[in-house]
Image (cartoon, rainbow, N blue to C red):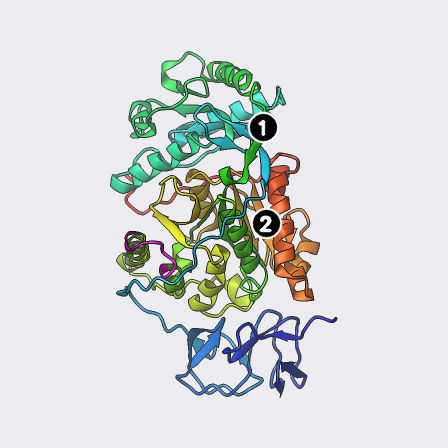
Amino acid sequence: MSAPMIIKINPGDNVAVAVGDLKSGQEISAGNIKLTLREDIGKGHKVALSPIAKGESVIKYGMRLGFAVADIAPGQKVHTHNLKTALSGTLEYVYQPDFKPVVPVNDGMCFDGFVRADGSVGVRNDLWIIPTVGCVNKTAENLAKAINRELPFGTVNKALAFTHPYGCSQLGDDHKTTQKLLAGLVKHPNAGGVLIIGLGCENNTMESFLEVLGDYDRDRVRTMITQKVEDEFETGLELLRELSAYASKQQRSRVPMSKLKVGLKCGASDGFSGITANPLVGVFSDKLVARGGTTVLTEVPEMFGAETLLMQRCVSREVFDKCVNMINDFKEYFISHNQVVYENPSPGNKDGGISTLEDKSLGCTQKGGSSPVVDVLGYGDTLCKPGLNLLTGPGNDMVATTVLAAAGAHMVLFTTGRGTPFGGPVPTVKISTNSDIAGRKSKWIDFDAGSILDGVPIDTLADELLDYVRELASGRIEAKNETYGYEEIAIFKDGVTL
């Protein structure tokens, strides 16, 4: 069966999405609707299926994308020139729970992970070098290069230096944010050993940072203050050798899928994101949650316009209230900087067919599947409840992926329509919305969701994705960002730099 020319997502929609580039004058159909195109419609872009008068709602996913700013005839393109957002400001919300409880799946599915001394489980056994301040970034990088010349050793394959520009000259919440984020990374179980490097005179002193870190395994975590040692390179290298010897004794063992924590992220989205890759990840999320696992969705600005769909799935009034605060607090963040709350879609998003923030958000939130929302976390908080979680964080790819990792995600499933080589501190799995980008960027893309457009059942592909994730978690394969060395962090900043 040939692929359809257009896709009408919901029976109530008055627009459809072009599967390929369509030309003016072409005759197309969607269900019982037949029409002639009045202009060219690019791949991933929307075409009107029925008359839409100026001021009327444009409907996609069965939800409003915004309102028409001019009369739109059937067969016309619907995009930023004739469609505007209907969103504005902070809102009041009413808790109207509407969700189904999770039906457990007890099939004994497992993966091979590293069980740490505190009972947490990692899917990698790397050495991580974490500076408390940007002044020692190059020291961290040089030490990583040096110890990597001696690796692999036992089950330790590589060392990673997670550099950043912060840790000094920060005030108030920014300073606390940096400390919480770095503490989350230090405790991440994907690291078999961690070396924390400080300068000695920064705001984020080693003493104050360790207070934030709390209890930690001193066999797994070592510290060095560079101003207090004779030769920071030799001292650091010796500490890394000790950490490598400790971590090399760690071996993989069978653990249930309930131990797995997966971050959900999208970037460089296009008009197919909400049709293929995001719904696929949503089905995957439901499958993992049913097995007792944990998933976490962030990118708060890309929930605007679809937030009520998440709010009605909150398991309690307490979780609902936390969700409302997360949404409105992030809107206030925009407003406090005199920025437009809803001007979110990037130029690349718009080129790919996304017109308004509602359009983007209704596609983005599908990564959360249909499971109940069990908890809402602040920036830098750590996952503690199995099931679907929401996490405060921006849409920025690097910042959002980093905060997902710091929350405890073992890996991040990253859907993309236009492609990106980026990767965070944990395996960052690129899932393409279309097969074209998967074919052209094979060194970026790990998994192709474009076959959904060709009729492959989404549940079948979700089972394949689940198997892929198990193999990745077990260390039998690696994500492309790991293969090509795209492993970075970025920390959220809001305030004054001294």
In the rendered view, tell whether residue 53 sits above or below residue 189: below
Inspect the image, locate mark 1, and give the three-letter code of the amino acid beneath it: Ser
**Residue 22 on image: x %, y %:** 66, 77
> SS of the residue at dot 1?
strand
Can residue 484 be seen at all in this image of the molecule?
no
Inspect the image, locate mark 2, and give the three-letter code of the amino acid beneath it: Lys
**Residue 63 on image: x %, y %:** 44, 72
Bounds of the magenta span?
311-318
Occupied quadrant, residue 156: top right
Which residue has dot 1 on it?
253
Residue 402 on the magenta span: no
Disc marking residue 430: 2
Q: Earlier in the sequence, mark 2 or mark 1?
A: 1
Left or right: residue 358 versus residue 334 is right
What secondary structure prevails in the magenta region?
loop
Label 1 crowd bin: few (<14), some (14–19), many (20+), radius 10 Å: few
Left or right: residue 169 versus residue 255 is left
